[in-house]
Image (cartoon, grey):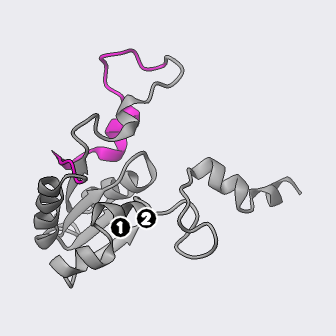
Amino acid sequence: MSRPLEGVRVVEVASWMFVPSGGSVLVDWGADVIKVENPAGGDPQRGLITSGLIPAGTVNFMVEQPNRGKRSVALNIAHPEGREALLKLVETADVFLTNYLEPVRRRLGIDNDAIRARNPSIVIARGTGQGPAGPDAERGGFDGASFWARGAVAAVF
Protein backbone atom coordinates (compact mmCIF):
# COMPACT_ATOMS: atom_id res chain seq x y z
CA MET A 1 0.00 0.00 0.00
CA SER A 2 1.44 3.34 -0.97
CA ARG A 3 1.44 6.23 1.46
CA PRO A 4 0.61 9.79 0.35
CA LEU A 5 4.01 11.34 1.13
CA GLU A 6 6.26 8.64 -0.31
CA GLY A 7 9.12 10.33 -2.14
CA VAL A 8 8.87 13.53 -0.08
CA ARG A 9 12.02 14.50 1.81
CA VAL A 10 11.74 16.63 4.96
CA VAL A 11 14.66 18.29 6.76
CA GLU A 12 13.65 18.89 10.37
CA VAL A 13 15.49 21.38 12.60
CA ALA A 14 13.30 21.24 15.70
CA SER A 15 13.32 20.23 19.33
CA TRP A 16 11.08 19.16 22.18
CA MET A 17 7.67 17.69 21.31
CA PHE A 18 5.37 19.90 19.21
CA VAL A 19 7.10 20.10 15.82
CA PRO A 20 8.98 16.77 16.09
CA SER A 21 5.58 15.09 16.64
CA GLY A 22 4.44 16.64 13.37
CA GLY A 23 7.55 15.22 11.72
CA SER A 24 6.69 11.74 13.00
CA VAL A 25 3.23 12.00 11.43
CA LEU A 26 4.90 12.88 8.12
CA VAL A 27 6.97 9.68 8.53
CA ASP A 28 3.74 7.74 9.12
CA TRP A 29 2.44 9.15 5.83
CA GLY A 30 5.57 8.01 3.99
CA ALA A 31 7.93 11.00 4.09
CA ASP A 32 11.67 10.59 4.55
CA VAL A 33 12.36 12.86 7.55
CA ILE A 34 15.93 13.78 8.43
CA LYS A 35 16.19 15.25 11.93
CA VAL A 36 19.15 17.59 12.45
CA GLU A 37 20.41 17.73 16.03
CA ASN A 38 23.21 19.54 17.81
CA PRO A 39 26.14 17.15 18.43
CA ALA A 40 26.45 18.50 21.99
CA GLY A 41 23.51 16.63 23.50
CA GLY A 42 21.02 16.57 20.64
CA ASP A 43 17.40 17.54 21.11
CA PRO A 44 17.09 18.96 24.66
CA GLN A 45 14.21 16.57 25.25
CA ARG A 46 16.81 13.76 25.34
CA GLY A 47 18.02 15.10 28.68
CA LEU A 48 14.60 15.57 30.22
CA ILE A 49 14.08 13.63 33.41
CA THR A 50 10.43 13.29 34.37
CA SER A 51 9.81 12.69 38.05
CA GLY A 52 11.97 9.57 38.11
CA LEU A 53 9.47 7.67 35.99
CA ILE A 54 12.11 6.82 33.39
CA PRO A 55 15.09 5.01 34.89
CA ALA A 56 18.48 6.08 33.54
CA GLY A 57 19.71 3.97 30.65
CA THR A 58 16.27 2.81 29.51
CA VAL A 59 14.18 3.78 26.51
CA ASN A 60 12.69 7.24 26.91
CA PHE A 61 9.37 7.09 25.09
CA MET A 62 9.00 10.88 25.39
CA VAL A 63 11.92 11.09 22.95
CA GLU A 64 11.20 7.99 20.89
CA GLN A 65 7.55 8.73 20.08
CA PRO A 66 8.02 12.13 18.37
CA ASN A 67 11.16 10.93 16.58
CA ARG A 68 10.16 7.46 15.44
CA GLY A 69 11.07 6.46 11.91
CA LYS A 70 13.30 9.46 11.26
CA ARG A 71 16.87 9.46 10.13
CA SER A 72 19.11 11.65 12.25
CA VAL A 73 22.29 13.62 11.73
CA ALA A 74 24.32 15.64 14.23
CA LEU A 75 25.39 19.02 12.83
CA ASN A 76 26.65 22.09 14.64
CA ILE A 77 24.74 24.60 12.52
CA ALA A 78 26.28 27.49 14.48
CA HIS A 79 29.58 26.55 12.81
CA PRO A 80 30.07 27.38 9.10
CA GLU A 81 30.77 23.76 8.09
CA GLY A 82 27.70 22.48 9.93
CA ARG A 83 25.50 25.20 8.45
CA GLU A 84 26.78 24.41 4.95
CA ALA A 85 26.04 20.70 5.48
CA LEU A 86 22.49 21.61 6.54
CA LEU A 87 22.02 23.85 3.50
CA LYS A 88 23.21 21.01 1.24
CA LEU A 89 20.50 18.81 2.78
CA VAL A 90 17.99 21.61 2.15
CA GLU A 91 18.93 21.56 -1.55
CA THR A 92 17.62 17.96 -1.74
CA ALA A 93 14.50 18.49 0.38
CA ASP A 94 10.87 19.22 -0.38
CA VAL A 95 10.07 20.56 3.10
CA PHE A 96 12.01 22.42 5.80
CA LEU A 97 10.33 21.83 9.18
CA THR A 98 11.36 23.90 12.20
CA ASN A 99 10.33 25.43 15.49
CA TYR A 100 13.40 27.63 15.84
CA LEU A 101 12.41 31.24 16.43
CA GLU A 102 13.01 33.67 13.58
CA PRO A 103 15.75 35.67 15.41
CA VAL A 104 17.61 32.43 16.15
CA ARG A 105 17.28 31.28 12.54
CA ARG A 106 18.60 34.67 11.32
CA ARG A 107 21.58 34.44 13.69
CA LEU A 108 22.33 30.88 12.51
CA GLY A 109 22.02 31.85 8.85
CA ILE A 110 19.06 29.52 8.22
CA ASP A 111 16.20 32.01 7.96
CA ASN A 112 13.65 31.81 5.14
CA ASP A 113 15.82 33.83 2.75
CA ALA A 114 18.84 31.55 3.29
CA ILE A 115 16.73 28.41 2.88
CA ARG A 116 15.02 29.68 -0.28
CA ALA A 117 18.36 30.84 -1.74
CA ARG A 118 19.40 27.18 -1.74
CA ASN A 119 16.02 25.71 -2.71
CA PRO A 120 13.46 28.20 -4.10
CA SER A 121 10.65 25.64 -4.31
CA ILE A 122 10.96 24.25 -0.77
CA VAL A 123 7.96 24.36 1.56
CA ILE A 124 8.91 25.99 4.87
CA ALA A 125 6.76 24.79 7.77
CA ARG A 126 7.28 26.48 11.12
CA GLY A 127 5.57 25.66 14.37
CA THR A 128 5.40 28.41 16.97
CA GLY A 129 4.13 28.82 20.49
CA GLN A 130 2.68 32.28 19.88
CA GLY A 131 1.83 32.31 16.17
CA PRO A 132 3.62 33.87 13.19
CA ALA A 133 2.43 37.47 13.70
CA GLY A 134 1.69 39.84 16.54
CA PRO A 135 3.61 41.26 19.47
CA ASP A 136 4.77 37.86 20.77
CA ALA A 137 5.59 36.21 17.43
CA GLU A 138 9.30 36.13 18.18
CA ARG A 139 8.85 34.73 21.68
CA GLY A 140 9.01 31.05 22.41
CA GLY A 141 6.27 29.09 24.05
CA PHE A 142 5.41 25.63 25.24
CA ASP A 143 1.99 24.16 24.66
CA GLY A 144 0.60 24.34 28.19
CA ALA A 145 1.91 27.83 28.99
CA SER A 146 0.90 29.21 25.59
CA PHE A 147 -2.55 27.64 25.89
CA TRP A 148 -3.27 29.22 29.27
CA ALA A 149 -1.76 32.57 28.28
CA ARG A 150 -3.78 32.81 25.08
CA GLY A 151 -7.35 32.18 25.97
CA ALA A 152 -7.68 29.04 28.03
CA VAL A 153 -8.77 31.25 30.89
CA ALA A 154 -12.09 31.33 29.01
CA ALA A 155 -12.40 27.63 29.89
CA VAL A 156 -12.95 28.54 33.53
CA PHE A 157 -16.10 30.54 32.81
Callouts 1 and 2 close, C-beta under 8 Å? yes
Residue denoted by label 2 = 103
Left or right: 115 as drawn, with respect to 131: left
Query: Identity of the amino acid at label 2?
Result: Pro
Q: Which residues are drawn in magenta? A: 53-77
Q: Residue at x 56, y 76 (%)?
A: 133
Mark 2 element type: helix
Q: Residue at x 66, y 55 (%)?
A: 147
Residue denoted by label 1 = 106
x, y percentage for residue 93?
A: 16, 70
Asked if residue 37 can be seen in this view, the reply is yes
Left or right: 151 as drawn, with respect to 68: right
Mark 1 element type: helix
Asked if residue 98 can be seen in this view, the reply is no
Examine the structure image and report whether residue 76 is included in the region drawn in magenta.
Answer: yes
Image: 131 above or below 73: below
